Amino acid sequence: MQPIFIDKNEIIKRYKPIDSHTHKGIQGHALIIAGSYGKLGAAVLASKCCLKSGCGLVTAYVPECGYQILQISNPEVMTLTDEKEKYISNISFDIKPQAIAIGPGLGQEIETQKAVHDFIKTNKVPLVIDADALNILSKNKDWLALLQPKTILTPHPKELERLIGKWSTEADKFDKTIAFSKQYGLVIVMKGAPTHIIDEETVYKNTTGNAALATAGSGDVLTGIITSLVAQSYEPIDAAVFGVYLHGLTADIALPETSYQSFIASDIIKYLGKAFLSIENN
Ligand SMILES: NC(=O)C1=CN([C@@H]2O[C@H](COP(=O)(O)OP(=O)(O)OC[C@H]3O[C@@H](n4cnc5c(N)ncnc54)[C@H](OP(=O)(O)O)[C@@H]3O)[C@@H](O)[C@H]2O)[C@@H](O)CC1
Ligand SMILES: Nc1ncnc2c1ncn2[C@@H]1O[C@H](COP(=O)(O)OP(=O)(O)O)[C@@H](O)[C@H]1O
Ligand SMILES: [Mg+2]
């Protein structure tokens, strides 16, 4: 297993410059299904980062208690609410997004599990699955077969273990993840230090990022970036590769100014502009 290193050359091959005649409709509409009581921050971070990565329109789908939180935190983000106050129980919307993310801060209530099932059973829109939506799939593994090919999963090591079971060595972890990716036709973003991406037999290894990213919400923000790129019509594997690279690059650019300690997930969002510029100015 020889990985492809995700470096600037790999990104320049994939990067789509912005057309001067584009408009917000062309830039893509993303839907972020996220949040539960006490974890609306995950929805705020993911949806804001989605917009800050070039997506034209972003809608957050949150429980009722998240309405004001979302509208006040992110005035540029539109908000739809579930009928339940504290958690999502029924995912229904009349917009036509080009990409959907599900999972950050979602919780694992039984009604939320059912809502995730009913949603993935009929959904045909390119999808990014993170956090509690991954944990829900781990508890209901037969639902994995409902996912569309090239759905992107973004597990951290514990979420990966819940999905594929314990591994004995690093090599075993890769073998199991490759087998899992092949079985369901999924793109797996194996978050860590560094992050690897598995697309069936192909393994990518990221070259950006540092320990400043070891902070709450850092993965929620990554979900927003990757979903934004999918909405802007990047292929799922290209969105995963570019998104992981950009996410790490924000921390590399920020580090001399912020220190490891004071860097927080909102700084990923703050430094995205410099990260995009460093890709454009090569
Ligand atoms: N502001 C908000 O609203 C926020 C909301 N959030 C939301 O909270 C929900 C729960 O998510 P979560 O990831 O905190 O819980 P969970 O899945 O039990 O995993 C924790 C365990 O996994 C492990 N582990 C993790 N990383 C690892 C690593 N790199 N390397 C190795 N191990 C690692 C580690 O296990 P340990 O090492 O302790 O055995 C740890 O104890 C989810 O919906 C998320 O979106 C958060 O994003 C925070 C901000
Ligand atoms: N020491 C580290 N070096 C590089 N990247 C890291 C490090 N620690 C965490 N990260 C990155 O931060 C993110 C953490 O994601 P996750 O655990 O899902 O956070 P959260 O659920 O709090 O949003 C991943 O992208 C991971 O690769
Ligand atoms: Mg996470």
Image (cartoon, rainbow, N blue to C red):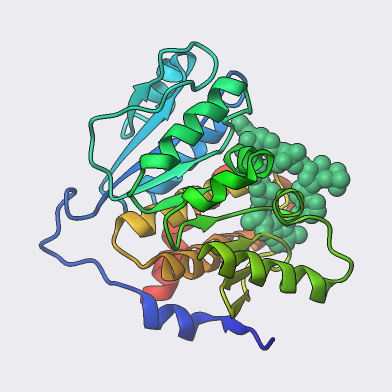
Residue 108 to residue 181: above or below:
above
Nearer to us in this view, 42 or 270:
42
Evaluate whether residue 17 shows in this view.
yes
Residue for point 43% across, 23% down:
90
In the figure, is residue 42 to the left or right of 157?
Answer: left
Q: Position of residue 85 (x, y in %)?
A: 49, 11
The image quarter in which residue 91 lies: top left
Instruction: Report the number of numbered marks.
Output: 0
In the figure, is residue 180 to the left or right of 261?
Answer: left
**Furthest residue in direction left, as rendered:** 21
Task: State ligand 1's quadrant.
Answer: top right
> Which quarter of the image is occupied by the N terminus?
bottom right
Nearer to us in this view, 111 or 11:
111
The image quarter in which residue 113 lies: top right
Nearer to us in this view, 211 or 219:
219
**Furthest residue in direction right, as rendered:** 168
> Which quarter of the image is occupied by the C terminus?
bottom left
Nearer to us in this view, 96 or 149:
149
Q: Position of residue 206 (x, y in %)?
A: 61, 73
Residue for point 59% across, 71% down:
198
Q: Position of residue 175 (x, y in %)?
A: 73, 74
In the figure, is residue 231 to the left or right of 103?
Answer: left
Residue for point 25% across, 48% down:
56
The image quarter in which residue 80 lies: top left
Evaluate whether residue 212 shows in this view.
no
